[in-house]
Amino acid sequence: MSQHRGIWRRQVHLFTLPYRLLLASPCVGFLPDFWSRVLTLSWDSHTHQYITERAILNVTLETLSGLKKHHGNHDKEEIRLSRGFWRAVGEVVKSNAATDFRSSTRSDPVYHFDSEHIESATVMLRRFWTHTVLSVRAKEYQSARHSLGQLFHSLQDFYSHSNWVEMGQSSIYLHLLQPEEPAVPVAKEDTPTCMECFSTTCRNNLLPRLKTTQENSQLLTTGYFSTFPPKPQGKCSHGGILDSSRYLGAKGGINKDSTSPLFSPHHADSPYRRINNIHHQL
């Protein structure tokens, strides 16, 4: 019995981590998702803000409900979250949004899983997670929320910038935060990944191996964005009207950042799966 209690305590410690780091000092506001929807002309898009808030809220409510049941409280009374909680969530969201605007991160492909920098981006993700855990243990909650926001941004970008969804994957990529889990090989620099696409919506521009559902044959890729690093011939672009690399072969793009074909060539491939992915990745 004592062994089971010890396992349970470790599990509670792990799952209450996101909640604990949200309980400390207040924070300021964050970039409203309203403007993101205006700029992309996609009113039904799910932004980084929405996905992050939803993930934290889901994990928090599940954790609190589990704690109540463990202590024998089976009442169905509503769980109320304080203003301090929402201010703390706002700080995580602000850190997330800043990744797209801070000069040191906005054009760095590692922070966005762009340009097939998948392995180095994965290393960075794990550093963010380690920093978050160590900051919580040191009761440096503001630092923890900052690194968690950065982690969320990159994690969300993996699912919307890669071909993970197109390979028929509906579950999370465990290897991103768990090194012991199997890794899907990344396409080599000289391996073509896309075909030409001459319209705003690119439905079938990934080469067959990049969208196969056979696990032993799968390859990961992400789109190249703008001019850095230079896009090799035959590689996929990020795509959309803000990406100058979309004119280089292979023309088009594969991102699923929004529901607008002007900004997201693969807008039809359900970018909303990122929500559940981020939730369960915690």
Image (cartoon, grey):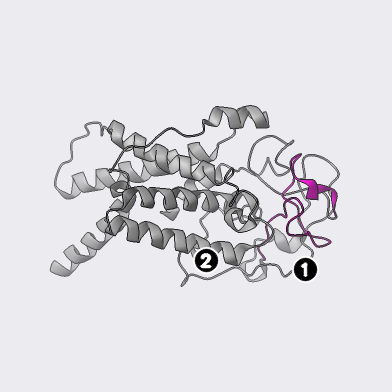
Q: Please give the label number shown on residue 265.
A: none
Q: Residue at x 74, y 41 (%)?
A: 242
Can residue 1 be seen here?
no
Marked residue nearer the N-terminal end (1 or 2): 2
Look at the magenta stretch and give its main secondary structure: loop
Residue 135 in view (yes/no)? yes
Identify the residue shown where x is 49% and y is 36%: 50
Horizontal and vertical percent position of residue 60 = 32, 44
In the rendered image, the vertical position of residue 35 relative to residue 58, given as above or below: above
Q: Residues within 10 Å of mark 2 (few under 14, many from 20)?
A: some
Residue type, numbered disc 1: Thr
Which residue is denoted by mark 2 in the rendering? Answer: 123
Callout 2 amino acid: Val
Left or right of 125? Residue 264 is right
Q: Which image quarter holds the N terminus?
A: bottom left
Q: Which residues are magenta?
A: 219-248
Vertical position of residue 188 compared to residue 52: above or below: below
- Answer whether residue 21 is magenta in the image: no
Q: Secondary structure at mark 2?
A: helix
Query: Which quadrant of the figure contains the C terminus?
Result: bottom left
Image spot of residue 20 (x, y percent): 28, 49
Residue position for label 1: 191
